[in-house]
Amino acid sequence: MGTCHAGDAPARAFRPYRRAAPARTLMVMERYDIHAEVRNPQVTAVARATLTVADLPPWLGKAYAAVAELLTAQRAGPAGPPFARFHMLGGGRFEVEAGFPATRPIEGNADVQPSELPGGQVAVTMHIGPYEQMEPGYAALASWVGQHGGELAGDAWEVYFSDPSTDPDPATWRTEIVQPCRQA
């Protein structure tokens, strides 16, 4: 079984969320199948913005459309499902980078820029359900990483395997959560 790193270091809380009580942590971790992987860097095309949670849904639709249009025009993808990566700023705001994997680096424009998802050790889980109920998945990943001798190493990202416009039942939406990690 892959781990971030062997060892029994105490669990570390994911910064945007409070640490769960031990019994709750075990219950949450049992709900999520978590494993470690080593990923290669992935060339991407993205739109970037600083937003609040309330601003996110309408912006994401426009961002994905702009990125897909540019990738198609440059014959560079999309090469996989859409993703979003968030960096918490505080005060209810965060920086978001949303787009698609690309088959090669793109030439950016005013709305879409080239980027890359980092390679290296990651802990991964699949959340099934509404987006607004993903917090326990992040908490489970953070706890699992700490229990396996690691620490969080950068911003997580979400990969969306369900399209709400064609699958209107949020209970069935599948979202992969990917958390970079390293040895503590």
Image (spheres, rainbow, N blue to C red):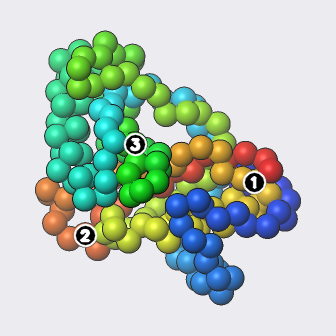
Q: In this view, does 144 lie above or below 155?
A: below
Q: Nearer the viewer, residue 59 or 3?
A: 59
Residue at point 16%, 40% (across, down): 62
Q: How crowded is mark 1: few (under 14 residues within 10 Å), some or many (20 or more)?
A: many
How busy is the neighbourhood of tag 2: few (under 14 within 10 Å), some, or many (20 plus)? some
Mark 3 Cα shell of 10 Å, populated few (<14), some (14-19), many (≥20): some
Residue occupying image coordinates x 46% and y 61%? 126
- Distance CA(mark 2)–CA(mark 3): 25 Å
- Apparent side of residue 182 relative to residue 167 in the rendered image (left or right): right
Residue underneath mark 2: 170
Horizontally, is 8 left or right of 117 in the view? right
Drawn side of residue 6 relative to residue 61, left or right: right
Q: Name the residue under label 3.
A: 95
Name the amino acid type tagged 3.
Glu
Residue pictured at 37% horizontal, 38% vertical: 97
Which disc is residue 150 wearing? 1
Establish if 18 lies above or below 181: below
Residue 49 appearing in the image = yes
Return the residue found at the far top.
107
Amino acid at the residue labelled 1? Gly
Kindly check if marks 2 and 3 are in contact, taking CB atoms under 8 A apart as contact: no
Query: Are the residues at dot 1 and dot 3 in contact (C-beta closer than 8 Å)?
Result: no
Residue 55, given in percent of the width and then of the height, sits at: 23, 53
* Mark 2 element type: helix
Query: In terms of secondary structure, where does tag 3 sit?
Result: strand
Q: Which of marks 2 and 3 is nearer the N terminus?
A: 3
